[in-house]
Amino acid sequence: MKALNAAIGANGAYMGQGLKTRLAGSPRSGASSAVAESLQIESTWKAPGVQGLDVSGYQPTVNWPAQYSMGARFAYVKASEGLSYRSPTFASQYSGSLNAGLMRGAYHFALPSVSTGAAQADYFINSGGGWSPDGKTMPPLLDIEYNPYATLGNTCYNMSAAAMVGWLKDFSNRMLSRTGRLPMIYTTAGWWSQCTGNSGAFGNQPLHLASYSTYVGNVPNGWGTYSVWQYSSTGPFAGDSNAWNGSYANLQKFASTADGAVPKPSIMSTGDLVAADASGALWDYPATGTGGFGTRKQIGQGWKGLRSINVIDWNADGVLDAVAQWTSGRVNVYLGIAAGGFSAGPVLAASGWGGYQLTIGYWLSSSYFPQVLTRDDAGNLTFWRNSSGGGLGTASKIGTGWTKLNLTMVDFDGDGTQDILAQDSAGTMRQYPSNGAGAFNAGSPRTVGTGWNQMTSLTVTFSFKGYAKTGLMARSRDGNLRYYPVPGNSTWGASTIIGSGWGSFLIAGGENINNAATPTSPTVAAGPPIKSGSDVVRVDAAGKLWVHPANGVGGLNAPNQIGTGWSAAKTLHVLDWNKDGVPDVLAQWSSGALSVYFGAKTGGFTGPVTLASTGFAKTTFVTGRWVKASSYPGLVGYGSDGALYYWANVSGRALSAPVKIGAGWGGLKIAMTDFDSDGNQDLLAVNSLGAMRLYRSNGQKGFVSETRKVIGSGWQSFRQFSSTAGFTGTTSKGVMALLANGQLGYYPIVAGSKWGPRTTAGTLPSSTVVSMATSAY
């Protein structure tokens, strides 16, 4: 410890210290030198968003009013490091920034091999690293990055990936328990991949990304984009320069909300597979980062009449966009929004492009924006410039004789410049290397494969299987989807099948080629036991757990057994308890215990995690996001005294102490749904006579003060009922009700806070239904 303290010295380490010694490579995601954490930029440039800075003892006298005048609105100040260092300038910097009108927060430089995460969290909090929802205090920040001290071993502090992930969880959980807030994590994509094993376990915590460039570049696994971007260590602000990803109003809300929103774009990763089905629905299959997919989600509708789709960060803002080429000849960009969804982007061509084959990528090595190459029916190859993230600039013909070749842009030889892989009708694949300046290298193309005419779709992907790893997803005529690693040495890695049944869905990254067949519904190689919140889950008399998958159009498919040993379950609740995108099962046991079984993306369940060991035997409750500002679903229910309580979900792992929100609820059957479509969850309560009343919530634990409206009658005949979402379409919602004969009735909730016509959803074997669950999460 004496040697370490000597190395720490008067000022210790600072944010980005390790990164600054590793400045090299390309600013683009997917290039072999890949990591946009690498480029020192001019000191006058400012990244988009609300400006901020971070400082430490190396900036002892900051002119805070001047920083404010330059546009800074928030600051992070170093408070502590390891277990033995407190910054002597923390107090003056922390108060000075606040007095100048900036929001401010504290950061801790982690030395994870020195102590437990909890011990360093305590040290940080005791050194000034707390948080309060006063609108002036940014969330606590954990700086976890390249080891700056030789006495602590290698880059990863001589710790295994599993140990590092455990340390991060330990630190985060202690911060949550003591401050009421999970810390934001400061790191680089490269360090994260190397030292956590590319963990995706921390996506519910905000990301402070270190990436010195005018382009965001790679984002660590588990996050779709950043909350704060440290984009420069050389100005324009004192210390390091940062930018908040959003508006000032959103920054204020983020600072004052305990579980401030983490940006989650519709397309989270360059490893995701995006595909349009025959109905025009656009789907995202999220990459796990380890060679598989999570649960798909619908991200669009109306994607019919397309020749090609390409997913790329067109405007270099760190959020992936979609470039749509329509058979009409129109080409336009849908710009990804950090919080999810898309906005209208530039029109690249109003017409005339219906006969072009497109391939899009970083054809100019010096550009932060992707470029477009087109091949027309006459065999002309044209290069179209994108110099600003808006419309297309000048076009240059760069080749002829490319007729009927299928083109894919990728850095196949690993030299940092994009190449063209061209497949002819005989199936031969040839590599045409580029010079990175818009033209091809001299010399003849090199044959790199045969038999590729058996493939009906080709998609270049990055970070699908390993951080910044390049690969090609290829669909064969039998509908199988294969992954071919591209190691960057002009060869292919061993291919693996990653899915089947993909038919000829239009898969983003290009177009259907080589006479693709008729579309069919895709299935991935493996998946969670419950695919959707609209699936019906039940326990039979033998204790077997079954799922009846919803077909999305108002019916149920054949059931699948997904568990045994559930005979003691009193009620089931399907919900995404830990917000990882996979449905979980919360079980209420006859003993009074509550436990959560987490759905695994690759199949089966993990856990269980016990939420309560006793005390819930006589509790009637429902689940959902009762508090609108919360990121997690909670519980609302009553016990034998009829008092209504709310239990918050603490970070997807535990229950808070109950908060009383009502009285007189004894004997009522309840369901939770947003019946009036105001964005707040409501309670539907049925009395012993079958009358259903609506209790509208205010989204803040309580109810709207009003006379309770009766919205139904005759509900006493149902054994069970629960809310459901997506049963007849992505935006649909309703109530699923079980009759004594096993018939399932679906009651849609339609515009105007009304019930639509009842339909029969299916029939369950009534004699074996111990408990049934659906979900509206």
Image (tube, rainbow, N blue to C red):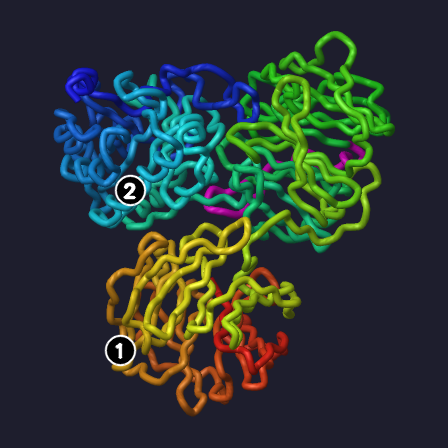
Instruction: Answer yes or no: is residue 189 visible.
Output: yes
- The residue positioned 39% from the left and 42% from the top of the image is 202
- The residue positioned 54% from the left and 80% from the top of the image is 738
Residue 23: name its quadrant: top left
Callout 1 crowding tier (Cα within 10 Å): few <14, some 14–19, many ≥20: some
Q: Is residue 517 above or below residue 96?
A: below
| Three-letter residue code for mark 2 | Asp
Instruction: Answer yes or no: is residue 354 visible.
Output: no
Q: Which residues are magenta?
A: 336-356
**Residue 11: which numbered mark, if any?**
none
Left or right: where does residue 425 sit relative to residue 264?
right
Q: Is residue 406 above or below residue 568?
A: above
| Three-letter residue code for mark 1 | Ala
Which residue position holds label 1?
Answer: 643
| Residue nearer the viewer, 263 or 297 | 297
**Residue 170: which numbered mark, if any?**
2
User: Which of the marked residues, 2 or 1, is nearer the chain's N terminus?
Assistant: 2
